[in-house]
């Protein structure tokens, strides 16, 4: 197994996400700044890649700081574990411009989730401490941001007032956004991660 120290992260800044936020009045006037840090390929094993993302606590206007949101190429699933802090994971299944499913999962240190291959995933830091979250994914994967970009964010935003629907989905599709489902995280890491190899 190849192991690297945490250095030279990819950094996501506000300018890359302004149009994906709930509070557009705030987003239009806020200065550009760093949102979160992605350390890719910290470990590599048998064609899988282990990444670590660090998301400091911030408010993006009325909304809690979050990742941009993406789904994976070639039907690759992904496995996440919280190493420090707390996380809210939003997963959504989108077909065209129609939201078919939306799931929220709260995670604390040691909790894990599996992102199904056909879902977008957004990671939110709802706490006042740094969130450190790790993931295993196929080295062949490419992140696809099309769904969140074309709809100006995920189908739900997590704000000071709780979960709020993204009206762009209902406006463009004429279909109601599904009620947000709440699921529990996994408490143990699977011993076998072979399910992460399943591409097209």
Image: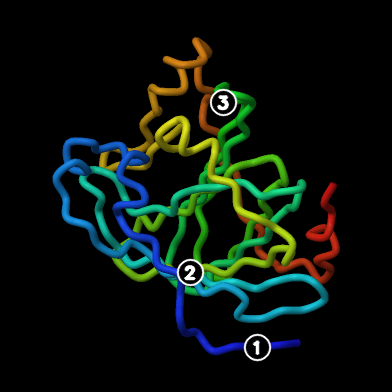
Q: Earlier in the sequence, mark 2 or mark 1?
A: 1
Measure how far apart labels 1 and 3 are at the Cα level.
Answer: 39 Å
Locate residue 116, reporting x and y percent: 71, 46
* Colour logic: rainbow
Secondary element type, mark 1: strand
Locate residue 126, reporting x and y percent: 36, 55
Measure how far apart labels 2 and 3 are at the Cα level.
Answer: 27 Å
Secondary element type, mark 2: strand
Measure how far apart labels 2 and 1 are at the Cα level.
Answer: 16 Å
Q: Which residue is mark 2?
A: 38
Q: Quadrant of residue 130?
A: bottom left
Q: Which residue is mark 3?
A: 99
Q: How many marks?
A: 3
Callout 2 crowding tier (Cα within 10 Å): few <14, some 14–19, many ≥20: some
Dot 2 and dot 1 residues touching (CB under 8 Å): no
Task: Please give the name of the residue rendered at 30% of the width and 52% of the height, measured from the top-left corner.
Answer: 15
Q: Quadrant of residue 67?
A: bottom left
Q: Earlier in the sequence, mark 1 or mark 3?
A: 1
**In the image, is residue 24 above or below residue 130?**
above
Callout 1 crowding tier (Cα within 10 Å): few <14, some 14–19, many ≥20: few
Dot 1 and dot 3 residues touching (CB under 8 Å): no
- Left/right placement of residue 8 relative to residue 200 reads left
User: Which of the numbered marks, if any, corresponds to residue 147?
Assistant: none
- Left/right placement of residue 126 relative to residue 90 reads left
Q: Which residue is mark 1?
A: 3
């Amino acid at each position: 197994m190849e192991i690297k120290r945490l250095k030279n992260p990819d950094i996501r800044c506000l300018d890359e996400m302004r149009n994906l936020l709930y509070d557009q009045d705030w987003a239009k006037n806020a200065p550009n700044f760093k949102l979160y840090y992605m350390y890719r390929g910290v470990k590599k094993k048998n064609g899988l890649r282990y990444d670590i993302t660090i998301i400091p606590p911030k408010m993006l206007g009325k909304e809690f700081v979050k990742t941009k949101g993406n789904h994976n190429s070639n039907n690759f699933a992904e496995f996440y574990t919280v190493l420090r802090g707390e996380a809210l994971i939003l997963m959504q299944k989108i077909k065209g411009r129609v939201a078919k499913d939306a799931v929220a999962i709260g995670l604390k240190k040691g909790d894990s989730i599996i992102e199904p291959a056909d879902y977008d995933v957004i990671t939110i830091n709802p706490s006042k401490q740094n969130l450190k979250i790790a993931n295993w994914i196929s080295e062949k994967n490419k992140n696809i941001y099309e769904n969140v970009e074309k709809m100006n964010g995920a189908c739900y935003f997590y704000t000071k007032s709780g979960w709020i629907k993204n009206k762009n989905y209902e406006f463009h599709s004429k279909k109601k956004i599904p009620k947000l489902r709440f699921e529990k995280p996994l408490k143990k890491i699977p011993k076998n991660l072979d399910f992460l190899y399943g591409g097209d």
